[in-house]
Image (spheres, grey):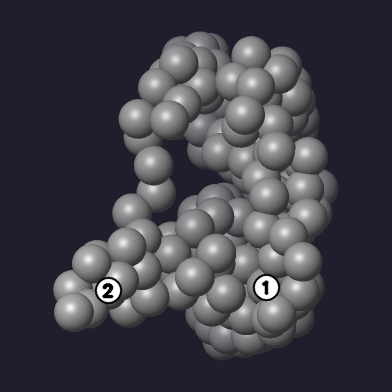
Amino acid sequence: MITGHLGVAAAARSRWPVVPLLWLLVASVAPDVLDLAYAAVGFCSPDGLYSHTLPAAGLTAAVLGGLAFLATGSRAAGLVVGAMVLAHLPLDLVTGYKPYWPGGLPLGLRLYDWPWLDFLVEVPLVLGGWWLLRRSGRGHRWAVVGVIGVALVLLQGTFDVLNGTLVKPNACERSAAAMP
């Protein structure tokens, strides 16, 4: 799941205006941001072990939810941000294929293997969330202009067209290649 996460964040903001949109957007992609951070520092997280398993997502949800609570003073904001992190996992079940428990078997529908099908699933999610946010009147002006909806569809299409050439960086390959 790529832009679909952002659509779910937008839909959540339309329902819970006390939660800043930026917090929801970050929380919706937090496991992917963790993967990128691990790769940037050369830390191997095989198959998203430290970002996409239930224990890792639970810890991430607790940390980000706690930070949101401290930053906003709202328990609702903390809970919604934590829930947004956890919502990442079932969405990834649709498109990906990875273990959701340390040592567990990989699960998922693997829609990334069929980019056109991935596009057909993600675009309604992102546009639906964007539309709900726009309709609610609770979004920032920059977030609800028509060009953002078009840009999100183009972003998803770009990811799907480049499927296989745009791969999330992973330090595990570098670690394995460095071994004698």
Residue under the point 32% across and 63% down: 173
Q: Can residue 99 be seen at all in this image of the molecule?
A: yes
Left or right for 4, reference 44: right
Residue depth check, mark 1 versus mark 2: number of the one nearer the observer = 2
Quarter of the image where one finds residue 131: top right
Disc 2 is placed on an element classified as helix
Residue drawn at x 18%, y 73% as measured from the top left: 178
Residue at 54% in and 78% down? 50
- Circle 1: element type: loop
Q: Is residue 64 visible?
A: no
Residue 11 in the image, given as x and y percentages of width and height:
74, 41
Q: Identify residue for label 1.
A: 53
Q: Is residue 174 left or right of residue 56?
A: left
Q: Residue furthest front?
A: 180
| Image quadrant containing the C terminus | bottom left
Circle 2 is placed at which residue position?
175
Foreground of the two, 33 or 76: 33
Kindly indicate whether the residue at mark 2 contacts the one at mark 1 (C-beta within 8 angstroms). no
Rendering coords of residue 60 (x, y %) = 59, 79
- Which quadrant, please, contains the N terminus? top right
Amino acid identity at mark 2: Ser
Q: Quadrant of residue 179?
A: bottom left
Within 10 Å of the Cα at label 2, are there few (<14), some (14-19), or many (20+) other Cα atoms?
Answer: few
Q: How far apart, in angstroms, are the residues tagged by discs 1 and 2?
A: 21 Å
- The one nearer the camera, 150 or 156, is 156
Q: Earlier in the sequence, mark 1 or mark 2?
A: 1
Between 107 and 13, the one lying in front of the other is: 107
Amino acid at the residue labelled 1? Thr
Residue at horizontal 66 percent and vertical 45 percent from the top: 96
Label count reads 2
- Residue 147 in percent (x, y) is at 46, 14
